[in-house]
Amino acid sequence: MRFDFDPRKSQLLRENPRRGIGFEEAREIFNRPYYFDRRSDVPEQYRAIGWVGQRLYSLVFEIREDKEGEIYHLVTLWKSTREEEELYAENT
């Protein structure tokens, strides 16, 4: 998988105590089992819920295309809510 994101936004997420990590770390979600669903139609965005270290996170991303194929553009992330934790547990 290839990823794209705004490095400035990644730094702001890392500094935010409610987020605690940047996009660099969040890519780990795709290395383990994760829950995946569609977040919105316009723009077409998806949500992945999965583990980064010992914590469950939710990540919103878009699937884009370039000359080399698909690239995941990371939009935002947060520590998963209790509802998202239950959704993950029921579906993975």
Image: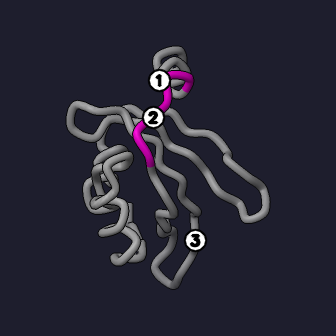
- Mark 2 to mark 1: distance in Å? 6 Å
Judge whether residue 71 is colored magenta. Answer: no
Residue nearest the observer in this picture, 10 or 37? 10
Of badges 3 and 2, the one in the foreground is 2
Residue of label 2: 80
Tell me how far mark 3 sits from mark 2, CA to CA: 24 Å
Q: Position of residue 87 (x, y in %)?
A: 55, 22
Instruction: Look at 51% across and 84% down and name the residue there.
Output: 67
Q: Amino acid at mark 1?
A: Glu
Ranked by sequence position, the earlier of labels 3 and 2 is 3
Per the image, the residue denoted by label 3 is 64
Q: Is residue 81 magenta?
A: yes
Query: Secondary structure beneath disc 2?
Result: loop
Q: Amino acid at mark 3?
A: Arg
Q: Which residue is mark 1?
A: 85
Position of the N terminus, as image quadrant, is bottom left
Mark 2 vs 1: CB contact within 8 A: yes
Up the image or down, 47 lies above or below 66; here it is above
Secondary structure under tag 1 reads: helix
Are the residues tagged 3 and 1 within 8 Å (C-beta)?
no
Q: Position of residue 86 (x, y in %)?
A: 51, 18
- State the image quarter where residue 37 is shown: top right
Crowd class of label 1 (few under 14; some 14 to 19; many from 20; radius 10 Å): some
| Three-letter amino acid code of the residue under disc 2 | Ser
Q: Is any atom of residue 92 visible in this view?
A: no
Residue beneath the point at 50% across and 33% down: 35
Q: Are marks 3 and 2 in contact (CB under 8 Å)?
A: no
Q: Image height check: is 60 above or below 54? A: below
Left or right relative to 13: residue 89: right
